[in-house]
Amino acid sequence: MPHAIHASPALALLEFESIAAGYLAADAMAKRAPIARVVAGTVQPGRLLVLLSGGVAEVEEAVAAGQQVAAGSLLDQVFLPAVHPGVIAGLLGKRHPIADALGIVESRSAASALHAADAGLKGANVVLVELRLSDGLAGKGVCFYTGTVSAVESAVELASAAVSPGHFIHAVVIPQLSPDIAATLHTGSSFAQNLQG
C-alpha cells in the first residue's frame, strides 16, 4: 500500500503532452528511485499528469529519470522539496471559506498552478481556498487564495512570479468579494457543480 501524499516532504508534478511518452516517463521514474507514491493519469485536453511524493533526494532522482526519457513531450514541471501542507490539502480537495479578499492566479498548465499555490502559501499569510488542475479547464490550472487584502496581494504577486515562463495567463485580487460569489466559490468553482447546487 503506497504511503499517503501528506506523509512526504517533497512533491513533484510533471505534465506531458503525449500520454504514451508520459507513461514511459512515469515507469522510468517509478523504477529509478524508491519514492513513496506515484500517481499518473490523463487530464483534459489529452495530457498526462504524473505526481511523485517522497523523500527529497528520491523524488529529485526520479524526476531526472522522467526528464531523460520523455523530455520532448514534457510540457511543464514543478519540484517542491519542502511542499507547503496547504498545497497537499488543496490537492486532496480540502476547501476553506473566503475571508476579507480573494486572489486568483491562472496558468496554462497544472504544474505552474501547483508551483503558484506553494509560492503564495509560503510567502504570505493566506489560505488556499481551492486548487484546480486541468480537468474542466482545457488544461489550465488555477489557485484561489483568501486572507487580508495586503496578504492576498503579496500571495498573488509571489504566485504569479512562480509560474513557468510562457504559462502565466492572469491574476486578480478582489477585496470584499460579493457574498453571492463567495457562497458559490465555497462549494467550488465548477459551473456545472454550482448550477446543480
Image: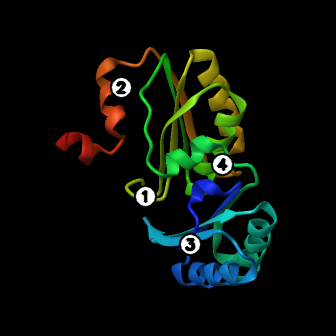
Give amino acid for label 3: Glu
- In the image, taking residue 194 as reference, residue 131 lies left or right, namely right
SS at mark 1 in the image:
loop
In this figure, which residue is indicated by the disc labeled 1?
A: 138
Asked if one can make out residue 16 in the rendered structure from this viewpoint, the answer is no
In space, the residues marked 2 and 1 are separated at their CA atoms by 24 Å
In space, the residues marked 1 and 4 are separated at their CA atoms by 19 Å
Q: Residues within 10 Å of mark 3 (few under 14, many from 20)?
A: some
In the image, which disc is placed on residue 182? 2
In space, the residues marked 3 and 4 are separated at their CA atoms by 19 Å
In space, the residues marked 2 and 4 are separated at their CA atoms by 24 Å
> Residue placed at 71% from the left, 76% from the top?
66
Horizontal and vertical percent position of residue 55? 75, 63
In this figure, which residue is indicated by the disc labeled 3?
A: 17
Give amino acid for label 2: Ala
SS at mark 3 in the image:
loop
Asked if one can make out residue 196 in the rendered structure from this viewpoint, the answer is yes
In space, the residues marked 3 and 2 are separated at their CA atoms by 34 Å
In this figure, which residue is indicated by the disc labeled 4?
A: 115
> Residue placed at 63% from the left, 51% from the top?
112
Could you tell which of marks 3 and 2 lies nearer the N-terminus? Answer: 3
Q: Residues within 10 Å of mark 2 (few under 14, many from 20)?
A: some
Q: Are marks 3 and 2 in contact (CB under 8 Å)?
A: no
Give amino acid for label 4: His
Q: Residues within 10 Å of mark 4 (few under 14, many from 20)?
A: many
SS at mark 4 in the image:
helix
Q: Are marks 1 and 4 in contact (CB under 8 Å)?
A: no
Q: Are marks 1 and 3 in contact (CB under 8 Å)?
A: no
Q: Nearer the viewer, mark 1 or mark 4?
A: 4
Give amino acid for label 1: Ala
Could you tell which of marks 2 and 1 lies nearer the N-terminus? Answer: 1
